[in-house]
């Protein structure tokens, strides 16, 4: 199968409606709608405990939302009750197919420690998408080069810095030629001096038109790179819009106060 | 007295009268059974630990029962129970199907019984090792669309190896030594052969010391192999400064 030609490219890379999520009696998400068009870079900001990461994890069903619908690249994910008051994908094959093209980058990198960087990057293309190993290796070398790790492809992740690990994790995500990339606080676990190198890679991806949803605490970065910023507060979208508006002229007092923390 | 009598050891008997060869055949049989039992235990351990961690309530209860009972009853008692009860069961079934008396193969029974016991211990070793795998690595596999089986085979099992290998090496050593228990069934493994040799020559010291040395050599070689395996399994992990 070829990864470069997508049979159908919906103008909406991602469309979710009414996402709710409760942990016990505590409702973390209280009905969230979001649309990302092809090439959109959506930055989700908000205080800790606002539900940002939970929301992101509901998009690929690592977390089961209590209610809502998720449509990825024009395809609705079919859902059924999971027996614990939440919704689970009703077709394992469908959710695996969608996940395989909805690459996720984690806060703590989550590279597979028993595999070299090269092995990490070719794993999903070869094992999940069925790409020829030879082809996957060429592609992986190219991607690792692009994130500045061409000289480290045979190293194991634990021997690298956090910044290098996160750049490798981005290469791993790119290797499945994703419809959209989900970033869960990609720089929060990094030492301050390593944040820049990772943000630079993400910025380059935004410039080449990658569709991305980012949960981030890097306000300057969000302002510069995002096409749309969503401010979550207490499980609701408090405010959303273009970064210039949102950062330059916050409407709600909560957002103004939140942004004040970063001055 | 023979000329090859050193420190009270009658080496003549070992070297020139064929008893040494008999001991080596006994050792070979012990190792074969130990290997079979260890492998069977490993297979049981992988499935049972996964069942214990990810199975439904009934599966978990049944596996808990298995590991608790097997780890509580002495191996020797289990061996006698499984061997004699197993033989009765096999023959009852054979009788129903119209076959005549079936002789239970000692080696197969040994592998089955010791493997069943080993399985209970390796279940716990592997379960603990799986729990030591950072949950994020498993989640990353799922996030890239892997099936549960693929996550297990490609990520969870290789990633748990560094934590499991010390415990599993231990189990292998125990498997080797537990084969001696099969002597009570009259199966000709190393301990049984040693008893025969010592009894018929009255050279107890020579033969039991020789058998002890063979067990020791087998253990030492195993240690070298398991240490290499550990180095390989830990290839992606930073060096432990305590090692």
Image (cartoon, coloured by chain):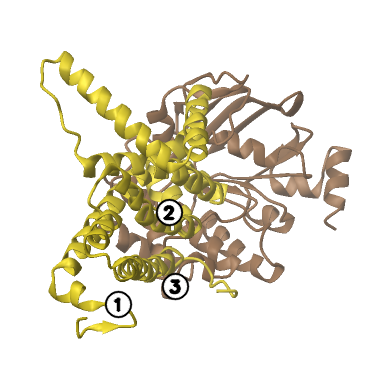
Give the brown chain's letter: A
Chain of the residue on which disc 2 is drawn: B
Tell me if A64 is positioned left or right of A232 in this view: left
In the depicted structure, whether residue A88 falls above or below residue A241: above
Disc on res. B171? 2
- Evaluate whether label 2 is on the same chain as label 1: yes
Chain of the residue on which disc 1 is drawn: B
Q: Secondary structure at mark 2?
A: helix
- Residue B167 or residue A223, whichever sits in front: B167
Disc on res. B9? 1
Q: List x then y, in percent, for residue B82.
A: 34, 33
Disc on res. A161? none
- Residue B75 or residue B120, whichever sits in front: B75
Chain of the residue on which disc 3 is drawn: A
Tell me if B39 is positioned left or right of A187 in this view: left
Cα separation between marks 2 and 1:
32 Å
Q: Is residue A236 visible?
A: yes
Drawing shade for chain B? yellow
In the depicted structure, whether residue A201 falls above or below residue B11: above
Q: List x then y, in percent, for residue B100.
A: 10, 22
- Callout in the foreground (1, 3): 1
Q: Secondary structure at mark 1?
A: strand
């Amino acid at each position: 199968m070829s990864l470069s030609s997508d049979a159908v490219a919906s103008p909406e890379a991602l469309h979710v409606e009414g996402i709710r999520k409760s942990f016990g009696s505590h409702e973390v998400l209280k009905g969230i709608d979001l649309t990302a068009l092809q090439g959109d870079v959506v930055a989700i900001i908000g205080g800790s405990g606002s539900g940002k990461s939970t929301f992101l994890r509901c998009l690929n069903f690592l977390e089961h939302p209590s209610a809502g619908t998720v449509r990825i690249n024009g395809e609705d994910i079919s859902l059924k009750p999971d027996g614990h008051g939440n919704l689970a994908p009703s077709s394992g094959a469908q959710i695996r197919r969608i996940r395989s093209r909805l690459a996720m980058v984690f806060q703590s990198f989550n590279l597979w420690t028993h595999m070299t960087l090269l092995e990490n990057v070719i794993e999903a293309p070869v094992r999940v998408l069925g790409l020829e190993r030879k082809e996957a290796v060429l592609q992986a070398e190219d991607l690792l080069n692009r994130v500045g790790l061409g000289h480290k492809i045979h190293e194991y992740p634990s021997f690298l810095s956090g910044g290098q690990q996160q750049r490798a994790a981005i290469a791993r995500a790119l290797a499945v030629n994703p419809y959209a990339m989900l970033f869960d606080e990609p720089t929060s676990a990094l030492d301050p001096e390593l944040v820049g190198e990772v943000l630079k890679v993400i910025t380059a991806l935004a410039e080449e038109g990658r569709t991305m949803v980012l949960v981030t605490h890097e306000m300057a970065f969000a302002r510069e790179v995002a096409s749309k910023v969503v401010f979550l507060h207490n499980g609701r979208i408090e405010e959303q819009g273009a970064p210039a508006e949102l950062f330059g002229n916050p409407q709600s007092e909560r957002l103004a106060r939140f942004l004040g923390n970063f001055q | 007295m023979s000329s090859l009598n050193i420190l009270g050891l009658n080496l003549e008997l070992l070297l020139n009268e064929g008893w040494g060869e008999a001991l080596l055949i006994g050792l070979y049989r012990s190792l074969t059974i130990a290997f079979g039992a260890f492998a069977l235990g490993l297979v049981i351990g992988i499935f049972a630990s996964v069942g214990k961690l990810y199975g439904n309530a009934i599966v978990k209860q049944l596996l808990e029962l298995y590991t608790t009972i097997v780890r509580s009853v002495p191996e020797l008692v289990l061996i006698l129970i499984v061997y004699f009860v197993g033989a009765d069961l096999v023959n009852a079934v054979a009788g129903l199907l119209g076959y005549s008396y079936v002789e239970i193969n000692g080696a197969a029974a040994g592998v089955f019984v010791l493997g069943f016991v080993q399985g209970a211990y390796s279940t716990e070793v592997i379960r603990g090792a799986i729990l030591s795998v950072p949950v994020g690595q498993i989640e990353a596999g799922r996030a890239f669309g892997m099936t549960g089986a693929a996550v297990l085979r490609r990520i969870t099992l290789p990633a748990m190896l560094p934590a499991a290998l010390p415990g599993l090496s231990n189990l292998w050593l125990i498997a080797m030594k537990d084969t001696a228990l099969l002597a009570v069934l009259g199966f000709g493994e190393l301990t049984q052969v040693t008893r025969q040799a010592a009894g018929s020559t009255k050279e107890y010291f020579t033969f039991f010391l020789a058998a002890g040395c063979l067990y020791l050599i087998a253990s030492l070689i195993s240690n070298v192999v398991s240490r290499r395996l550990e180095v390989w399994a830990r290839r992606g992990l930073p060096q432990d400064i305590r090692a």
